[in-house]
Image (tube, rainbow, N blue to C red):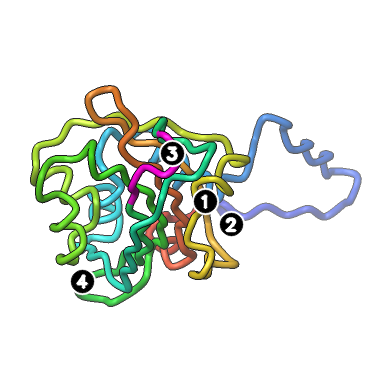
Amino acid sequence: ALGTVCCSRLSDRRPMARPSDSIVAVTPKMRLANGLGKTTASVTEFLEHLVGEPVDALDRHHVTTPAPVPNLLGVEGGHRLIARSTVLRGRTSGQAFLYAESLLVPSRLPAGFCEHLRTSSDPIGRILSRYGIEFTRSPLPDSERQHATVLAGFPTPNQHLLARTYQISINREPAMVISEWFLPTLARFLGTC
């Protein structure tokens, strides 16, 4: 029959080609890292586009804390900072997609920004957008994550697709350091090969 292959003799078989060294399995983690690396959008906008629903910052904790020495924000030791932890959840699904810890310099943010952050369920990215704040994001090495994570009382996820730490600068001054753990619930939105 047309389209049917019959191998009646083993000697007719050709050896299978070896897999190429240049072919790499693409994992959800790689897709996520690639997407985040290419976007100029905020993480909030990126997540909302990826999961197809608005996300809100829930399970929020805010603490005023003195800046440690050394720090990644370029402020003097003892300078007043806000430490925040939150979970970004889908507004409709209630699914947790991201756990984040942030360290912010209130004196480098517009008036009202920190109050909005404290009293609303808006993620940082949405607030930056609402205030029309232009920012740059600079990745920090994994070794710096321990200096960025100041909320030791709040657990970080044991399991995640991707973790990263970066600095947000506004008007060329460091204003925030954010550590993020993208949770396994995102894997279904990242497709398969």
Name the image quarter holding residue 73.
Answer: top left
Numbered disc in front, either 3 or 1: 3
Q: Can you name the residue that lies furthest to the top here?
A: 172
Q: Which residues are magenta?
A: 76-81
Rendered location of residue 114, percent (x, y)? 19, 53
Question: What amino acid does circle 4 point to?
Answer: Arg
For label 2, the SS is loop
Which of the marked residues, 3 or 4, is nearer the chain's N terminus? 4
State how far apart marks 2 and 4 are (Cα): 55 Å
Mark 2 or mark 3, which is nearer the start of the sequence? 2
Residue 76's x, y, as percent? 42, 34
Q: Say which element carries label 3.
A: strand
List the residue tagged with mark 1: 163
For disc 4, the marked residue is: 91
Q: Nearer the viewer, residue 3 or 169?
A: 169
Q: CA distance from mark 3 to mark 2?
A: 60 Å
Q: Nearer the viewer, mark 2 or mark 4?
A: 4
Provide the secondary structure element on which disc 4 rests: loop
